[in-house]
Image (cartoon, rainbow, N blue to C red):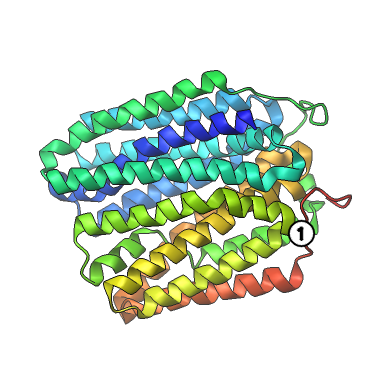
Amino acid sequence: MLNVFFLGLVSFFTDISAEMVYPLIPLYLTSAFGATPALIGVIEGIAESTAGLMKVYSGYVTDKFHKRKSLAFTGYLCGVIYKLVLLFASSWAGIMAARVIDRAGKGVRVAPRNSLLSDSADKHHLGKAFGLHKTLDMAGASLGILCTYFFLRSSADVSQYRRLFMIALVPAIVGLCMFVFVKDKQPERRKVNRSINLRYLFKSFKTLDRRLKLYLFIVMLFTLGNSSNTFLLLRASSVGYSDPGVILIFFVYHAVAAILSTPLGTLSDKVGRKKLIVSGYFVFAAAYFGFAFATGKELIACMFVLYGFFTAMTAGVERALITEIAPCELLGTMHGLQSTITGVALLPASIITGLLWNTFGRTVPFVYGASLALAAAVMLLVFMKSAGCVMSEES
C-alpha cells in the first residue's frame, strides 16, 4: 500500500495545482481576451476530446511496453508545462493550447497510473487502494479550490491571475518529485507482451468478459446524462450564490468525496463493486432531481453534498471493478478505454444539456440526466452478474 500512498501524493499535489487554476480559466478568457461562452465551450470541448482519445492509446502503450512509471510521469509533467504556457499566453488561442496540453497529459497518465495502482494493491483490498488514492486526489482538489476561493475574495483583478498561475507551479513540481518514491512493480503473472498490436486488440475485444462489455456500455449510457460540472456551478449561481460562493460550494463537494472515498472503497471490498456502483447511480439520480427542482441555496448545497457521496461511491470502485474483470495483459488498455468512453461521451452530454437548458430552462436537463442514471442503474442491477471482492475464475 506504500506505493498507493505515494501515487496518491502525486495526485494530491497535482490536483492542488490544477484546481487553483481550473475555476479561473473561464473568467480569465472572458475578462482578458473577451471570449464568448460559445468559444469557451469550443475550447473545453477540444481539450476534453483530446484527453478522451489519448486515454485508450496510452493504455495500449502501457500494456505493450510496460513503461508505466515513465509514461505516468510524462502525463503529469504536462501539468507543469500547462501552467508555463498559461503564464505566457497572450490570446485565447494560447489558452486553448495550454488546455489541450493539460488534457493530453491527463489522457496519457490515467491508464499507466491505474495499472500501477492495480499492481500495488492486494487483490482482496482493491477498493480500499483505489479509494485511498481517490481520497488524496479529491483532498488536493479541495485545497486547490479553497486557495482559489480566498484569491477571489481578496482580489478578482484579472491582472493578478498570472500570479496565481505562477504559484500553482509549486505544488505541480512537488507532485512530480513524489515519483522518486514510486516503484514500477512488474508481477510475474503479467509479462511484457510486445506482440500486442491493433489486430491483437481487435481479436481480444471479441473475447472480453461479457460483464466488461456490458459495463462499458452502461458507463457510456450513464455519461450521456452526466454533463460537465460547469452546469452544476451555473445552477448554484442561478439561485443567488456569488462567484466566491459558487467556488466554496464546489469545495464542499470535493471535501465530501475526499472524506468518504476510502471508507466506501473499503466497503466495496466486503459487499462487492456492483452494489456500490448501483447505489451511486441512484444517489446521482436523486442529486440531479434535486438540482432540477431546488429553489433555494440550502437545498442546492445539500445536492452538492449528495453529489460528493456519488463520486465517493463510484470513482475508485469503478477502477477496482475494471481491474477485476479485465484481462491481465490488457489491464491498461481497459482502464484507458473506460476513461476514453467517459471523456468522449461527456462532449455530447454537455452539448445536449446546454441545448435543453437553452430550449426548456434549467429543470429539463437535470431531469434528463437523472433519468439516464436510473436507466443505467437498473441495467446494471438486472443484467450484470455480480463482480465480487476478488477476481473470479471466469474473469
Q: Quadrant of residue 384?
A: bottom right
Front-lying residue, 179 or 217: 179
Residue named by callout 1: 211
Residue 393 in percent (x, y) is at 89, 50
Residue 346 in percent (x, y) is at 47, 58
Is residue 108 depicted above or below 385 in this figure? above
Q: Residue at x 41, y 40 (%)?
A: 140
Q: Could you tell me if residue 365 is visible in this image?
A: no
Q: Residue at x 30, y 68 (%)?
A: 235
Q: Residue at x 51, y 65 (%)?
A: 224
For the view shown, which residue lies furthest in the right direction? 393
Front-lying residue, 320 or 303: 303
- Amino acid type indicated by mark 1: Arg
The 10 Å Cα crowd at callout 1, few under 14, some 14 to 19, many 20 or more, is: some
Q: Is 88 left, or right, of 394 in this rendering?
A: left
Is residue 183 depicted above or below 358 in this figure? above
Residue 29 in percent (x, y) is at 21, 47
